Amino acid sequence: MDEPIRFDTKIAVLLRDDLAVWQRLNVTAFLVSGIAATHPEVVGEPYEDADATMYLPMFRQPVLVFEGSKEFMATAHERALRREIEHAVFTQDLFATGNDRDNRAAVKAVSTADLDLVGMACYGPKNAVDKVLKGAAMHH
């Protein structure tokens, strides 16, 4: 039997607990795309079925999803900044935009402390990401 694969890094998404289901799904998809785009080492090999049909690769490790209050979002964001953990952010304003240019402009218009975060995704050493998200509940 093969030994279980262990990872010393963690991919984690934190969602604000008052989002609608469609918002949670949308925010998660957008946030993890930033990790895949900047860290090719987290992407595995392409998939292939028994008929040799090829599919795109996915992350090589699990993505853990957590949730927290608006206040906890700000706390986790501050922890990520203080610990210099790479992370992606999704703000409330991004629900009203329709493209990357407008998304980036919406974030740029607001100071760090005033970002109305609805989601963030972290990638880094497992113990450091755990410290950023300490107190968050697993999404259910």
Image (cartoon, rainbow, N blue to C red):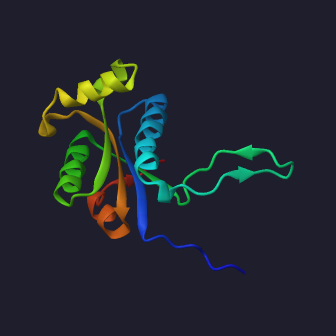
Q: Residue at x 36, y 23 (%)?
A: 95
Name the side, left or right, on which 48 lies relative to 139.
right
Residue 79's quadrant in the figure?
bottom left
Name the side, left or right, on which 94 lies relative to 61.
left
Considering depth in this image, is 134 or 13 the residue closer to the camera? 13
Above or below, 121 relative to 16: below
Residue 85 image point, x, y percent: 27, 57
Residue 74's quadrant in the figure?
top left
Q: Residue at x 42, y 62 (%)?
A: 10
Above or below, 75 relative to 2: above
Name the side, left or right, on which 76 lies relative to 30.
left
Point out the residue furthest to the right here.
51
Residue 115 image point, x, y percent: 19, 34
Quadrant placement of the N terminus: bottom right
Residue 78 image point, x, y percent: 18, 51
Q: Total number of numbered labels?
A: 0
Residue 136 image point, x, y percent: 33, 54
